[in-house]
Structures are given as C-alpha cells and as structure tokens.
Image (cartoon, grey):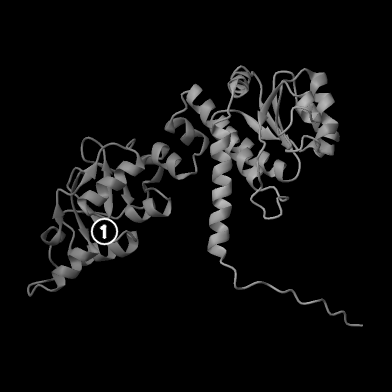
Amino acid sequence: MVIILPQKRYNIIMNYKTIAKETLEIEAQTLLLASQKIGDEFNEAIKTILECDGKLIITGVGKSGLIGAKMAATFASTGTPSFFLHPTEALHGDLGMISPNDVVIAISYSGESEELSSILPHIRRFGTPLIGMTRSKESTLGQHSDLIIDVVVEKEACPLDIAPTSSTTLTLALGDALAVCLMKARNFQKSDFASFHPGGALGKQLFVKVSNLMQTKNLPIVSKDTKVKEAILKISEGRLGTVLVTDEDKKLIALVSDGDIRRALLQDDFSLEENVLKYATMNPMSCEDENMLASQALVLIEEKKIQLLVVTDKNKKIRGVLHIHTLIEKGIS
C-alpha cells in the first residue's frame, strides 16, 4: 500500500528580508538590554574563575549544551583551561572529572532541566563552586548555584515565542563576555593565542620560521664555469625554476631562472655553449637569518618581486632555499 503524505504548503509571498531584519533586531535588543543589567554577580563570577586552581567545567543539555560546548572551546583557546561535560555522561561516571578545585558553569534557561538537575546535588557535595546561567534564582539550578548570571529575555525571536533563539544568543554572548574579561584580566596576548592555535593563521604568522620551511636537500647548484645547457638540465632536475651559481669557494654569486633562459633565447647571439653567468642575475637577494619568521620572508619576497629566497650563512655559503609556492601551500600570509 502506498501512503501519500499531505503536500506541504508554503507562503511564498512573504518578505523574508523583513522577517530576518526583525529577528536580528529582537536579538540585538535582547543583548542591549542585558548589557545594561550586568551586575556585581558577574564580577564575582570572574573573580571565582580567576581564583580557580583547577579547570572551568561547562555543562548543559540540548541547545544549552551546544552553547556550553562552544563556550568551553572559547575559554580553552583563550587561556582558561576548560572542557564541556554532558550531564548524562556525568551521571554515568564522568562526575569523577569534577574536583573541589574546579569551577562549574551550569546552563539551563528554565533552570529545571531534569538531567542537569540530577547532578547538581553531587556538584554541591564536592564543594565545587557553581555558577548558574538561568532566568530564575528560584529554579532548581538557581537554588543550587553560588552565583547566578541572568539570561532572562523579554521575547524569543521565534514567532511562537517558544524555540530558544534570543535566549541562546544571549547565553552565547555572555559566555563571550566572560572569556573577554578573563583574557583582559590575564593580559592574554596575540602570542598567547597563537600558542594555543599553532595550526591557525596567527600561529603560523608568529611561530613558523624560515628554517621550518626551507629546502636544504637536492638543491640545484652549479659552479660559475657551467655552460648554459648544463644549467638548463639542472633547472629541470631541481624543479624550482632556478639554478644557483657558486664560485670556487662555494659562495653564492648568482642565480639563473627559467625566465632568464627564455629571455636569452630571444637574443641573436644566444648559445647553449655560453657560460651561464652571461645570462645570470648577479648578487641575488638572499637571507642570512634562518630564524626569520616565514611571514616576514613572504613580505620580503613580495617586496623584491622574486619567487625564490636563497638562505645563506654569513659567508654567503648556501644553507637552503625558500620558494613562494611553499609559503602559499603552508598557509603563510
């Protein structure tokens, strides 16, 4: 038997731009009103977290749990050791992850979430400071909490005033506010942030050095007596589009790119038997500091309009090369 489901009907003449605008305005107004009501308990919450010798543990169920997981990630990446603990997992053994030296932030708009309410007495039994993010001090969460961060809203952005919208936005924003306050209190700097994000763009800018990325093996190097035809073979083998030319002391004196060769081909007197120095760039741009940040090397490469930066020691002996393509591939900017 084939069951035919009733066809959904959509109102396609609505002005969705207007609805979106109203939604953002409702949530923006919620945040503005909340900013005017932040009280002393917020300061006490910051003080409690700063004095914590352990971890900041965030817990919540459903959408509050999703907000809590994001908050924990933000705290952890901005200098406050933190993780998210689901109440159900806590009831089945993970309560052991909470110690008296920790601080717990529990999130529930109603303050009556059954799963969350079940672990609150146990948190109190441990003597762990508990910060509740809820709309009511009279709720189960409110009564168990040492401090309350008020997340009450006048209206959800949901047209039915049911689905958590304004309330979750406010909770998330207050979590960000806590994180920013803690960052300022700890004088958290860009370098600190980068140390927690070594794979991110900022981490790469602040920590990746020329020595980490430069090629040191199988370099395309020829002597100053090399003929053009031999240099071309070396360029092909090296796959860098360039050959490095050294003197009798193995010091860098020139380089020849495939572009130099192509331009030389247009000359009437071009010969493969010529000395490579005839078509070389003499005294090419080089770098003696292997510890230079890769981001700074990229700036240098772009300023000089070159593709290959040769890295040498103070005596101009070649240590390695850094190609612009390598920088781009590694996300250096």
Identify residue for label 1. 242
Q: Residue at x 49, y 39 (%)?
A: 198
Question: Which of 123/29 is in front?
Answer: 29
Q: Say if 225 sits above or below 30 in the image.
A: below
Q: Is residue 92 above or below residue 255?
A: above
Residue drawn where x is 73% and y is 50% of the image: 162
Quadrant (top left, top right, bottom left, bottom right) of the N terminus: bottom right
Considering depth in this image, is 133 or 261 the residue closer to the camera?
A: 133
> Residue at 74% across / 18% down in the picture?
100
Left or right of 79: which side holds 288? left
Q: Quadrant of residue 119?
A: top right
Q: Quadrant of residue 281?
A: bottom left
> Total of numbered circles in the picture?
1
The outermost residue toward the front is 154
Give residue 188's position: percent from left, percent from top. 47, 27
Closer to the camera in the image, 236 or 184? 184
Residue 319: which quarter of the image?
A: top left
Give the image location of residue 241, x and y in percent. 29, 61
Q: Position of residue 303 (x, y in %)?
A: 22, 49
Q: Amino acid at mark 1?
A: Thr
Let me know if residue 93 appears in the view: no
Instruction: Between residue 159 and residue 256, name the one nearer to us.
Output: 159
Mark 1 burial class by Cα count in 10 Å: few <14, some 14-19, many 20+: many
Q: Secondary structure at mark 1?
A: strand
Is residue 238 placed above or below 253 in the rendered structure? Answer: below
| Residue at the extreme right | 1
